[in-house]
Amino acid sequence: MKNIILFSLFILISNSLFAKSPKKISEYLKGTTKVSGYFNIHHHKKDEKYYLELKKSKLNKDFLMTASIAEGIGLKGVFAGTMLSTVIVRFRKIGDNIQFIFRDLRHQAKYDKQMKKIVDKAFRDTIRANFKILASSSGKYLINADQFFQTDFYQLSGKLKRIRGGSLNHNPKLSHVSSIKNFSKNLEVRSYLAYTSRSSSGAKNSFEILVHYSFFPFPKNKFKPRKADSRIGYFLTALKDHSIAQNHSGFVRYIKKWNLEKSEKNAVQSLPKKPVIYYLSKNIPYKYRKYVREGILEWNKAFEKIGFIGAIEARIQMDSDKWDPENNDYHTISWIASEKAQYGAIGPSRINPLTGQILDADILFDESRLRGNFRKYLRFFGQKPQKQSNEDHNETLLNETCNIYENLNSQLGLFLLAQKSLKKSISKDTDKKSKDNKKDIKKKKKEALKKLVKIYKENQEEFMGQAIKWIIMHEVGHTLGLRHNFKGTTAIAYKYLHDKDYVKKHGLYGSVMDYPGANISKDPKKQGYFFTPTLGAYDYWAISYGYSTFAKNEKKELNKIASKSTSKELAYATDEDGRGSGTFVDMDPYAHLYDLSDDPLRYSEHMIDLISSSWNDIVSKHSVKGESFDQIAEIYYSFVSEYVRKLDQITKFIGGRVFHRLHKGDGDIRPIQLVDFKTQRKALKMLSKYAFNDKYLKVSKELYEHMPAQRWMHWGTKIWGQPIDTDIHRVNLYIQKSPLARLLSPRSLSRIINQELLYQDEKDLLTLEQVFQTIMKGVFSNYYDNLKKPHYTLPKEFVSSNKRNLQRFFVKKLMQICQDNKAYDREIPYDAKTMARHTLKRILFRLDHLKKEVPFHKMDAISKIHTDDTMSRIKAFLNSSYNSSNY
């Protein structure tokens, strides 16, 4: 035993004598290049390794980290431009390890020490990563930066697993650092994070996502946060103070804003201590710079109203400038080009999550979308598009995705088609003036053509220039802290839409933060601004709340500003109001995307008339000699989408409620206001005209025969098993059933039923029975209209093919309401079930009665068969045992 102990001691002593001493920092850094900045990084180019050098003074100190997805998978929020949250982080040393901590400072108890102890115990920080210290000396620690930057800090694997399904995990071995840029105030790192999924068969598949990490310090200034107000649309940061007893939620909300201060504190008008400077990247094409600059500087009008002179500046990045757009000291507007754009423009900002202070902001403008629209314009003029090269660009941090371009295609297309009346007008005038001889006529027509081309070119410049200026105004608004305002378009009266003098002064919308509809005149000679040339009243008001300075009584003065919210021109509704978080949850017809004016019904009617009169002009206006017809279907479908949008807004008026973001004492109106029954009835009548009547959906065989699907077969295309032609019946049914889906949804039906209870004393009350009866008579109009007139002649096709499809869908929808308990994750009201059953009986009675009348015997064969089939299906359903047991 004694010998064994002695032998063990000998082994231990030998190991200690011959063991390698720990590597020094200098040994690890041999052959590396130092990248100095916010955190010192060392790059070993030969081995492609990165090391992070941490000073002891950097430990246990909070700083900020944000991230975005630079290259994604194009699904459910994981696409280029998706911004991830800004978080408070710190490094801490535990033994031989450095831990990366996500701080939880959202939960606070500022005014109660005892409560603070409870909160600190209840809400703990999160350890997101742990790294072995490779070496240390002189108060410095070295860790593996590759391992650090390849960590899935935001735990994207969980989201990706929900999207793709199956087993999926982050794979650090396949991940790698793409680039590192280090500055004095920020560190920018791009890393390809790899994820490996395993299918049910056991096969492995790996893919990458490029994540852009940004690390930067808290600002060193005396920024005073400003409390948010629900009546005005600012992005906000929210904290929860558990020591605030008087606030039932405990939430403290601050708006996101710049630290803008007057250089002369008490002056009525003053220069700012530090203006917000936007730099136009040198990759912006020269022809667009004018409009970009105008869009930026337009915001100075709002700041001048509150005493700031030159609050916003626009400067051009010169070729001699060596600074990088990713440097936090520079707020840039850059042009990028992509093969398949996933957004039009985005306006990101980096903020302090504790105060809401904006620290940096950049705007990315995707030229690909603009180029696509420009090519459509050239197609209309019968010209071949010129080849356009993609200029070099610097990609910067991506942020708030803003689908501002989504409707621009159809807006441009409609504008171009509206020009046909101009061409006809000029040709007509020429024919009138040239009655002498053929030579004179030819000469006059040549002159008219030159005039037409000149007008086209002027309109092209005007359309594109106005579009760019408005988009920049919108995105700069985001970087100033403003959210979308989807009630902005309702501030301007319909009669002023094409009044250039009025619009130049007041704007085309109440806010540039809206997504407006196309401002297209049927008569090009009376065309006003295509897009708003200036800020609206709401924009001035929002800036006054966010950036006004007060010598005293700030809370009182801010409330004075916000209490003006009941003014028509200051109406506000944002994403959760206009889009909703569920199917058909949005109820306010004035909080709608892509509308225009204070009379959305009139505007919708105008646009539907314009679209329906333009179906058969698509081929002649959008095809180019020598090119394929691939684009015709794309343009057709963009018009279909526009048509459906207008029907959707019309439908929102039926059973609609107007929501006002107001506080008690702001005025006599209430937060929720019924859409008056006169307007509801008007909307219902419009649906019968534009949705249930197929007169407006007539597509010529010429258009149908010029809409082949693209026939390229390779990666990135979908052709196998796809039809070559367009199913017009299917498209028309999609248009017609879209408003029915909303109108017969549980939420809409519930509101209609509720208004019978709450407003039964109101004049002209619209009831559930009246809604069902109007829809029924609209859908089955051919069975009700004209049949009793003495000289009525049956049409060749009594029930058109479009009508047959719509009637089958409506009957099926009524049956679903009867037998299903839920639709769109909401319980179907029982009154709606009984009304649906009653409506089926009424349809059956009407069809049965018609069969006994003389016109039925003269009806065409397919209409007779359809009538018999509809009756048989309804009879079978009403007599079914399943249906009976549901009541």
Image (spheres, helix red, strand yellow):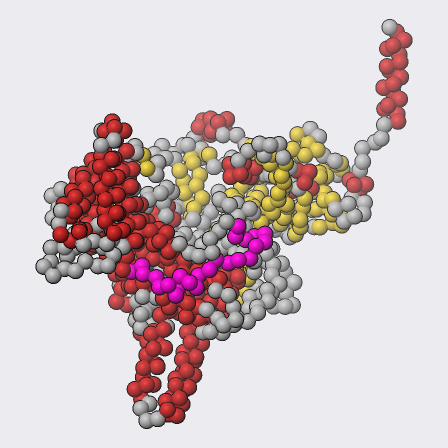
Q: Front-most of 775 and 3?
A: 775
Which residue is at a point 41% across and 58% down the rendered structure image? 637
Question: Which one is in front, 455 or 875?
Answer: 875
Q: Position of residue 194 (x, y in %)?
A: 63, 41
Does 180 sit above or below residue 790?
above
Query: What x and y, as percent, mark residue 600?
Result: 28, 58
Q: How many marks?
A: 0
Q: Is residue 368 left or right of residue 827?
A: right
Residue 190 percent coordinates (x, y): 63, 48
Which quadrant of the figure contains the N terminus? top right
Majority secondary structure of magenta residues:
loop
**Against 265, is 620 above or below?**
below
Residue 547 versus residue 165 in the image, above or below:
below
State the image quarter where residue 88 is shown.
Answer: top right
- From this viewpoint, is residue 795 visible? yes
The quarter of the displayed image where residue 302 is located: bottom left
Q: Residue 189 vs residue 725: left or right? A: right
The C terminus, quarter of image: top left
Which residue lies at the image location 48% right of the left edge and 62% below the top edge?
Answer: 630
Verify whether residue 703 appears in magenta: yes
Residue at 35% from the left image edge and 51% from the top image edge? 734
Is 198 left, or right, of 47 in this rendering? left
Q: Percent position (x, y) of residue 407?
A: 41, 59
Can residue 222 be seen by looking at this rendering?
no
- Does 712 appear in magenta? yes
The span picked out in magenta is: 696-720
In-front residue for pair 303/409:
409
From the viewer's perspective, tell me whether residue 764 is left or right of residue 303: left
Q: Residue furthest left?
A: 790
Residue situated in front as seen by the camera: 364 or 630: 630
